[in-house]
Image (cartoon, helix red, strand yellow):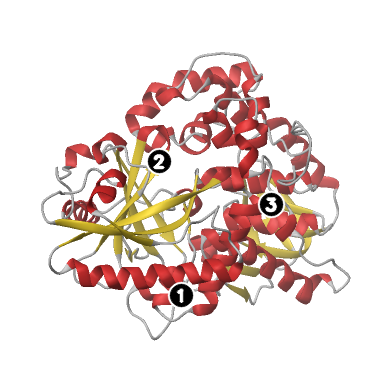
Amino acid sequence: MSATSAGAPRPPGSTALDARRRTRELDALADAGEIDLLVIGGGITGTGIALDAASRGLRTVLVERDDLASGTSRWSSKLVHGGLRYLASGQFGIARESAAERHLLMTRLAPHLSRSMAQVVPLYSPGHMTRGAYVGLGYGLGDGLRRLVGTPDAVLHSPGPLGRDETLRLVPAVRREGLRGGMRGWDGQLIDDVRLVVAVARTAAGFGASVLTRAEAVSATGDTAWVRDRVTGSELAIRARCVVNATGVWAGRIDPDVHLRPSRGTHLVVDAARLGGSDASLTVPVPGSSSRFVFTVPAPHGRAYIGITDVPAGTELPLVPTPGDDEVTLLLDVMNTVLEAPLTRDDVIGAFAGLRPLLTDPRHDETSDLSRRHAIIESSTGVLSVVGGKLTTYRRMAQDGVDAAVRMRLGSSVANSRTRSIPLVGAWPRERLASLDASPRLVRRYGAEAPFVARLADGPEAARGVTAQELEWGVRAEGALSLDDLLDRRTRLGLVPADRDESTDAAAAAFERAGVDPI
């Protein structure tokens, strides 16, 4: 569905992912012969590569050990960064690339899954005013990047100073005593990171890619991978002209020539009312640092996130990382420096942590200073690994990865990348989203597909107002195979254990209405 196309939204057809399609396509691989590209990993990097390759006409298969976005891609800050942080460290190239990719996401690829978000830094007397000038300079440089890549004011506004009253209106939970005002910048926010991954995967499926979850690559070379179906236990060999490893921090398990230094980023989940129900990001400098901040992010279901830390992750790489107790303390302590009513451990109703696949750089010891630039590494086994990078620049990472595969393995006759002009499923012009025949809640989550979600039958609701239709759509169209897929990823109710427990019966009922047994 084009974000600029005219006429009424069309229902999804070949973009729908479900258990039946998975079984059919997995069975067909036994007799498929050699395919063009096999992608290992179903996070934002792998799904992006699958979309780029399939839209060029390449026969593409993606295999994922668990579920879409089951790893790092679901543990982000849910932001579409414009590259301000990289300007501060002199990385102008990646800063411009970030701003350009943010522009594409918010104006063309996924306007329905993104929005502008105010970032407010409160300023207190006397020392904070100097800090305000520094922050204002940074916001101004970031706004220059926005203008350079062509993002209009209607999508992201210009930054500027705030008076005391306006600061309190935007972030009402801040401490009033000594407050002078604030600085406001703007950046992009995703409705949810998993929703982006699922949309990319489904768009790839619409171009003919086979997107196979619970399919584990147990071994791989440059032209073959042995894949185990984790539902049935059966195994098959998939032959491909090129095998691409897109497994993030776990890339070394597929390609021993990849060496990363992962870092862990932790977020806390609190009730949004505890922060005054603010729709803006309250941004607080970390004491003693000129470039690190702790910030809040408005979240679905009446929640808010507080993040983010950046600490070495060590050698253990669990699928679901555990936030460190000292990280929880740090986030609360920094945020409490500006809050009228300090947060306590009792206010923390959930927490999550993600592992970033950072490329090592001998010039830096701190993980927060390592490059977020992506790279393509050719293994001695012939596998191509796409590593590093970040959520915002997934499309460019994918384009570069497929370009490398074309250059090294597939031949120059393959078409150039088309993904700059391919809107994701559900994309619809931002200014016309309100005209869709569905509730604002569904429009925010599904865009042009919201009317089709709304037409599904009623059933038991989950926690926090998540409807039976949302749950059933996750099974019928978004590839959910288990209760965990629905609760932990398609809806994110699993971020708060109490919400998850309240919703298991409704999730099970959704599978029953769809006529599918959960695994």
17 displayed left or right of 491:
right
Measuring from the top left, give residue 226's x and y in whole percent. Answer: 68, 55
Mark 2 vs mark 1, CA separation in Å = 28 Å
Q: Which residue is mark 2?
A: 299
Circle 2 crowding by C-alpha within 10 Å: few under 14, some 14–19, many from 20: many
Please give the residue where the numbered disc 3 appears in the rendered image.
Answer: 62
When the figure is inspected, residue 118 is found, relative to residue 515, above or below; the finding is below
Element type at mark 2:
strand
Residue drawn at point x = 60 percent, y = 51 percent: 42
Q: Which mark is residue 232?
A: none
Query: Residue 351: x, y in percent?
Result: 32, 44
Q: Mark 3: few, some, or many residues within 10 Å (few <14, many ≥20)?
A: many
Quadrant hosting residue 134: bottom left
354 vs 281, nearest the viewer: 281
- N-terminal of the two: label 3 or label 1? 3
In the picture as drawn, the residue positioned furthest to the bottom comes out as 363
Mark 1 lies on a secondary structure that is loop
* Front: mark 2 or 1: 2
Residue 106 in sight here = yes
Label 3 is placed on what type of residue?
Answer: Leu
Is the residue 156 above or below the residue 24 in the image?
A: below
Tag 2: amino acid: Ala
Q: Position of residue 260 (x, y in %)?
A: 46, 71
Residue, disc 1: 371
Marks 3 and 1 in Cβ contact (< 8 Å): no
Upstream in sequence: badge 3 or badge 2:
3
In space, the residues marked 3 and 2 are separated at their CA atoms by 30 Å
Front residue of 61/104: it is: 104
Q: Considering the numbered disc 3 on the image, is that residue within a helix, a strand or a loop?
A: strand
Label 1 environment density (alpha carbons within 10 Å; few <14, some 14–19, many ≥20): some
Q: Quadrant of the C terminus?
A: top right
